[in-house]
Amino acid sequence: MVYKSLLLSVALTFFLGYAFTIGITTPNSLLKKLPDWGAIPLLGVVFVLYLLAGWWAIKGFGDHKILASISMGFCTLGIGFYALGFAMEIGHGKASPGQYDYDFSRLDATEKDALTQIAADAGLTLQDATFSEHWHMMEDAAGFRTCVQKGHVTALRFSGKKIPDLALFSRFPKLGDLYLVDCGLADMSDLQGAQVERLDVSNNRITDLSTLSGCPNVRWLFVQNNQLHSDAGIELFTKLVSQDLSGNPFSKK
């Protein structure tokens, strides 16, 4: 019984680890393919399975104290992950003071001016913003999607919009996640964002990765469906954890 408890608790913890890393941050991950309503039932199933694993560990504690203790440790860790995930889903759309802002009332004036100009160039206004937490930034919105924390823009997503002045993005000192998808971009040399760690420029007309060198600290890079003829320039991004260059001419050969 203890062995079943250990196996189940380890499997569940690895699943939650995947869910809170790759699952919620990578486009087209298996978790992202689930409907929105499926998140809470899934977490409920995981919680019940953790309780089962914990019960098995308690029942078998007398025979295998060390293994049972390890299993209960995984259960405790996993239930902590579960509680965090459940709170994130239940709290979605509710402002959390000091964590996420759901309006522009505290936004830095310089950043607000820059965002107003970017939106105007895209044929939008600040009223077209959809406020999101980071884990929802990969979802398209009717206007544009933004994440604001403590008065600073920390993530932006524009999809299918024209972005003529990339230099404006340098005015967001806390911008860590930037999604410019299907924006007709080819030359991105004006984009300067040393703080950007996640960059998604899929479905554009980029021919050379070196045009993205203004974001040298990118860790997650998505350049699918562009016009790259090679992966030359990828070495510029020394902190890369993951990249997706699929759908380019060189990757189809």
Image: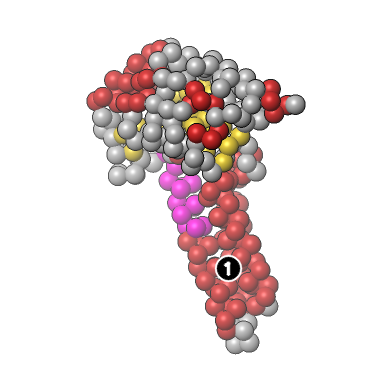
From the viewer's perspective, tell me whether residue 160 is left or right of residue 195.
right
Q: How is the image coloured?
A: secondary structure
Q: Amino acid at mark 1?
A: Leu
- Image quadrant holding the N terminus, namely bottom right
Question: Which one is in front, 8 or 233?
Answer: 233
x and y percentages locating residue 55 in the rendered image: 59, 74
x and y percentages locating residue 144 in the rendered image: 45, 24
Residue 65 shows in the view: yes
Helix, strand or loop at label 1? It is helix
* Residue at the (53%, 48%) spot, across then down: 21
Does residue 33 sit above or below 81 in this rendering?
above
Residue 136 shows in the view: no
Prevailing SS of the magenta stretch? helix
Most extreme residue toward the left is: 109
Q: Few, some or many C-alpha atoms within 10 Å of disc 1 (few <14, some 14-19, many ≥20)?
A: some
Residue beneath label 1, please? 51
Query: Hey, which quadrant is residue 206 in on the image?
Result: top right
* Residue at the (33%, 29%) spot, across then down: 172
Does residue 175 sit above or below 19 in this rendering?
above
Most extreme residue toward the right is: 253
Magenta segment includes 92: yes
- Image quadrant holding the C terminus, namely top right
x and y percentages locating residue 165 in the rendered image: 40, 15
Most extreme residue toward the bottom is: 62
Query: Hey, which quadrant is residue 222 in on the image?
Result: top right
x and y percentages locating residue 192 in the rendered image: 39, 26
Query: Hey, which quadrant is residue 122 in on the image?
Result: top left
Does residue 116 sit above or below 10 in this rendering?
above
* Residue at the (30%, 44%) spot, across then down: 97
* Residue at the (65%, 22%) spot, across then down: 229
Does residue 31 sit above or below 235 in this rendering?
below
- Please give the range of residues in magenta: 81-93
